[in-house]
Image (cartoon, rainbow, N blue to C red):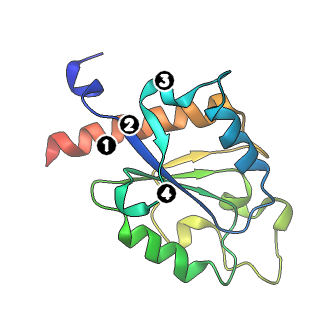
């Protein structure tokens, strides 16, 4: 691993756009001592204005669509969007629900997908590592 890859920590902002909270529980599991996401320098932050990574769970509910776009716009560039869980990609168990307005990638651009219902914490950590690589490439170009 080069020195450029470890020069900064990733700060992650999590937004739930209408999921059943199964993915949220797995994200919390990734933060526990068993998986310890923070040992890699990655941590959750409370504001999208401080984040490098936007982690989205769930399909987009009607009321969350404008809020998701606003959070995306508030996240500074360069940024990476992770979509966690199958329901954010295709609807999952909420498929054809009256209150959904589509998957996440119809509203904001998604860089990394993490399939599963719910996905394993290892898959979430691997996706964040992929996001790290994408951010490093984006910073080298800029």
CB-based contact (under 8 Å), mark 4 and mark 1:
no
Q: Nearer the viewer, mark 4 or mark 1?
A: 4
Where 57 falls versus 11 (above or below)? Answer: below
CB-based contact (under 8 Å), mark 2 and mark 3:
no
Residue 39 image label: 3
Element type at marker 4? Answer: loop
CB-based contact (under 8 Å), mark 2 and mark 1:
yes
Where 21 falls versus 74 (above or below)? Answer: above
Is 102 left, or right, of 93 in this rendering? left
Residue 132 image label: 2
Element type at marker 3? Answer: helix
**Number of numbered callouts drawn:** 4
Residue at the spot of label 1: 135
Where 133 falls versus 3 (above or below)? Answer: below
Q: Earlier in the sequence, mark 2 or mark 3?
A: 3
Q: Earlier in the sequence, mark 2 or mark 4?
A: 4
Q: CA distance from mark 4 to mark 1?
A: 20 Å
Q: CA distance from mark 4 to mark 3?
A: 19 Å
């Amino acid at each position: 691993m080069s020195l450029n890859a470890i020069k900064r920590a990733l700060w992650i902002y999590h937004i739930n756009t209408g999921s059943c909270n199964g993915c949220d529980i797995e994200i919390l599991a990734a933060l526990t001592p068993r998986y310890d996401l923070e040992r890699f320098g990655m941590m959750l932050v409370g504001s999208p204005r401080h984040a490098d990574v936007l982690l989205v769970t769930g399909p987009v509910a009607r009321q969350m669509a404008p809020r998701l776009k606003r959070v995306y716009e508030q996240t500074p560039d360069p940024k990476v969007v992770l979509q966690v869980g199958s329901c954010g990609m295709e609807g999952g168990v909420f498929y054809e629900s009256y209150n959904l307005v589509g998957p996440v990638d119809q509203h904001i651009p998604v860089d990394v997908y993490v399939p599963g219902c719910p996905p394993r914490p290892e898959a979430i950590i691997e996706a964040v590592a992929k996001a790290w690589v994408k951010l490093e490439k984006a910073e080298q170009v800029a």
